[in-house]
Amino acid sequence: MIRPKNKWIVWGISIFNALLMLAFSLYWLNLPYTFGDEAFLIKWSSLLKKSLLQIDPKPNPEEVLFVDVSGNKTVIDGVDEFGDKSPYNRIVITDREQLTQFFGLLNRYRHEVRFVVCDVLFAESTTADSLLQVKVDSLGDKLLGVSHLNKSGKHTRPVIRMPYAVSTYNATQGLFLKYPLMLGDSLKTLPLVMYEKLNGARFEYQEGWLFYQINGRRSLHAPIIDFKLRQSDFKVGQTMGEANFAVWPMGTILESQEFMDDESMRAFFKGKLVIIGDFINDVHRTPLKNCPDSYCCTMPT
């Protein structure tokens, strides 16, 4: 039997240990990366939640339009070791002329479109940039682009001027598990900026605090991603009127202008969150198999 005096000592040690473990847990959860055991826990808890318990809410497929640019590529001259353009250093990029046509289509129906996220890194300059810039400027606040951090950790801005957010994140054991809301003390990442713009949210950052504040509610610095959409939720769209999670090739949408009337095209874009990206090559490992990076743009919805 524990004596009364010793009982309070045991209780004190137990409470201190519990508080210490809670503090460590909150600290680990706020890190932008995960440890091996934590990655294992995240993976299997996600599988249990979504597969066994069927707790798997999804956005409305009629409110999201995924536009794939993987088939709209071109090649330009890269820069050699002397800093000069060279035909022997070729770079594959998304075709700016075709993007200009698509952004022209978006501008035509800009009052119907809810918001546009362009998950294309405009890292190289081309001769077609000036025409694309005009179309980009016309979308104004309805457009959000991406920037990134290079291998040395330096922030690289896109050559096409537009509102943008950082799309860089850390992968643990090759798995895409967390998305930090900020990098450093000034660079907001894509999920946070999307949430602010789509929901009129107010974000508050105070250096050294354990939580961020979003509309007065606490948020972790690097939330674990709840992958609402996965490859199994998608199929190749066959008709423009299908209400499903489908990834549409950008070329198919551009060609559709020839046989779709204005009213049908307007209905196709109405109320849509348009997400433009490479859904074939820009793929990352997740606890729920491989997933294109652009699917995570649905997270703030």
Image: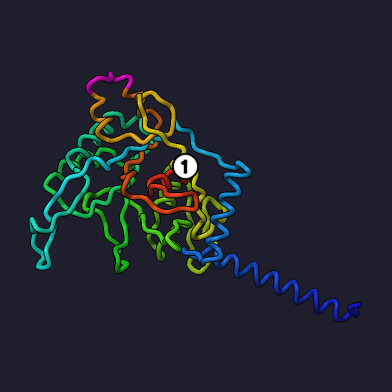
**Mark 1: few/some/many CA within 10 Å (<14, 14-19, 20+):** many
Q: Residue at x 33, y 24 (%)?
A: 266
Residue 205: % across, % down: 47, 60
Q: Residue at x 60, y 47 (%)?
A: 49
Residue 66 seen in the figure: yes
Q: Nearer the viewer, residue 160 or 62?
A: 62
- Relative placement, left or right, of 210 versus 240 is right
Residue type, label 1:
Leu
- Compared with 230, 176 (above or below) is below
Circle 1 sits on which residue?
A: 229
Residue range of the region highlighted in magenta in the rendering? 258-264
Q: Residue at x 48, y 56 (%)?
A: 177
- Relative placement, left or right, of 169 versus 156 is right
Residue 2: % across, % down: 89, 78
The N terminus sits in image quarter: bottom right
- Compared with 154, 291 (above or below) is above
Q: Nearer the viewer, residue 122 or 88?
A: 88
